[in-house]
Image: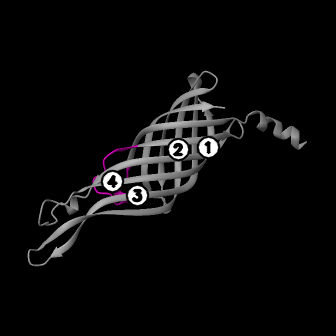
Amino acid sequence: MLLILSANAIAAQCLDIRLGLGSFSLNRDYGYERPAVGWYVSLGLTYDYTPEWTMGTVFNRSYNVYFRESMAETPLLIGNLPTRAEVNSDHFSFIFSRNIILPFGLKGQIGLGMGLAIDENRFYHPILFDEEQAAYRGVNLVEQYEVGIIFPGQFAVRKALGIRWHLGLQAGVFLDQQFRMRGSYWGPELGYRF
């Protein structure tokens, strides 16, 4: 009896690999001053458990720049303090998604998940304050790392290009442990079905 019930699920199982590239935005309220729009690359490996449900893992690497304007007037003996800073983030996620059939041969997918984020924050910080001249003597490049749990949300629309390939658009958000938005992304993706 169990074999008969699971036959439909076994027939629907397919493995997809997806590559995405697009725009990534940091949330200004998350602690970054004047963030610029960055970019991301993602690699996903998903598995159709049934025709309606998909689960899989996604790796997303994002590159962003922000500007520390509050530090612009920091007195230095020689030159100015660089205000440009970088945040590179790695997001490792497990996502459970619902497949939706759309008109015109399109397939939609909406999903939620849980994962891990590793942020590498690089910025310049003044060092060695000279009290006589009321200025700093130099700057130091600081690299800070932060690790935390994330909750990704994802939406995608795809069009099949033959039997194995598909092309689509994906968008999503990353929330932190307090469900504050860390960042959002959108862009095209290319997929291959095994």
Name the front one of labels 1 and 4: 4
Question: Residue 84: where, in percent of width, then height?
Answer: 25, 54
Left or right relative to 86: residue 169: right
Tell which circle, 1 or 4, labels the residue nearer the N-terminal end: 4
Tell me the crowding category of disc 1: few under 14, some 14 to 19, or many 20 or more residues within 10 angstroms, Cα based.
Answer: many
* Quarter holding residue 37: top left
**Going 53% across and 57% down the picture, which residue do you hit?**
116
Residue linked to disc 1: 97
Question: Residue 121: where, in percent of width, then height?
Answer: 37, 59
Tell which circle, 3 or 1, labels the residue nearer the N-terminal end: 1
Identify the residue at the far left of this view.
133
Query: What numbered label is drawn on residue 154?
Result: 2
Residue linked to disc 3: 120
Hey, what amino acid is under mark 1? Ser
Answer yes or no: do the residues labelled 2 and 4 have beta carbons within 8 Å? no
Tell me the crowding category of disc 2: few under 14, some 14 to 19, or many 20 or more residues within 10 angstroms, Cα based.
Answer: many
Between the residue at mark 2 and the residue at mark 3, the CA separation in whole angstroms equals: 23 Å
SS at mark 2? strand
Looking at the rendering, the stretch of residues picked out in magenta corresponds to: 26-39
Residue linked to disc 4: 86
Q: Is residue 26 above or below residue 22?
A: below
Q: Does the magenta run of residues contain 32?
A: yes
Between the residue at mark 1 and the residue at mark 4, the CA separation in whole angstroms equals: 32 Å
Tell me the crowding category of disc 4: few under 14, some 14 to 19, or many 20 or more residues within 10 angstroms, Cα based.
Answer: some
SS at mark 4? strand
Tell which circle, 4 or 3, labels the residue nearer the N-terminal end: 4
Q: Is residue 74 above or below residue 61?
A: below
Between the residue at mark 4 and the residue at mark 3, the CA separation in whole angstroms equals: 8 Å
Quarter holding the N terminus is: top right
